[in-house]
Image (cartoon, helix red, strand yellow):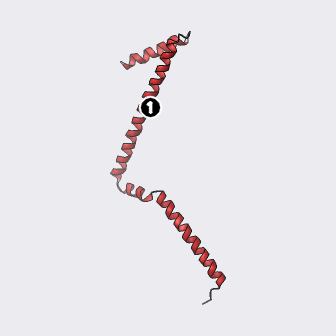
Amino acid sequence: MKAVTPKEEARLAYLLGQLERRTKELALQVEKMRLAEYVRLLEHPWRLMYVNFISGVARGLGIAVGFALLSSILLYFLRMLVTANLPGIGRFIAEIVRMVEMHLY
C-alpha cells in the first residue's frame, strides 16, 4: 500500500471540506423548497384537491370583487362625463349607462 504524503492528505482534507459544505448547501436548498411538504401533499390526493378547491374559490371571489369594483368606478366616471355635458360624447355615454342600468334591474 502506498503511503499518503502530507500534500495529498491536505488536498483530501480540502476536498472533504468542500464536499461537506456543498452537502450542507444542498440540504438547505431542499429545505427551502419544502420538498417534504410537497411529497406529503402528493401522498394525500384528497387534501391536494381541497387545497386546490379553496385556492380556486378564493381566486374566483377575488376576480368577482375586483371586477365589481372596477366596473362601478368606471360607471361613476362615465356618469360624471355625462353630467359634464360634453357634446357628442355625453349622449353616447348616457346611452351606455342606460343600457347597463337596464340590465342590472
Q: Quadrant of residue 11?
A: bottom right
User: Residue drawn 57% across and 75% down?
Assistant: 16
Q: Is 40 in front, or is 77?
A: 77
What residue is pinned by disc 1?
Answer: 66
User: Residue drawn 55% across and 10% down?
Assistant: 88
* Quadrant in the picture for the C terminus: top left
* Quadrant in the picture for the N terminus: bottom right
Question: Where does the image place residue 96, in percent across and percent down from the top left?
Answer: 47, 16
Q: Residues within 10 Å of mark 1 (few under 14, many from 20)?
A: few
Above or below residue 37? Residue 81 is: above
Residue most extreme to the bottom: 1
Does residue 46 appear left or right of residue 88 in this picture? left
User: Residue drawn 39% across and 16% down?
Assistant: 102
Question: Where does the image place residue 47, in percent across and percent down from the top left?
Answer: 34, 51
Does residue 16 appear left or right of residue 42 in this picture? right
The secondary element bearing badge 1 is classed as helix
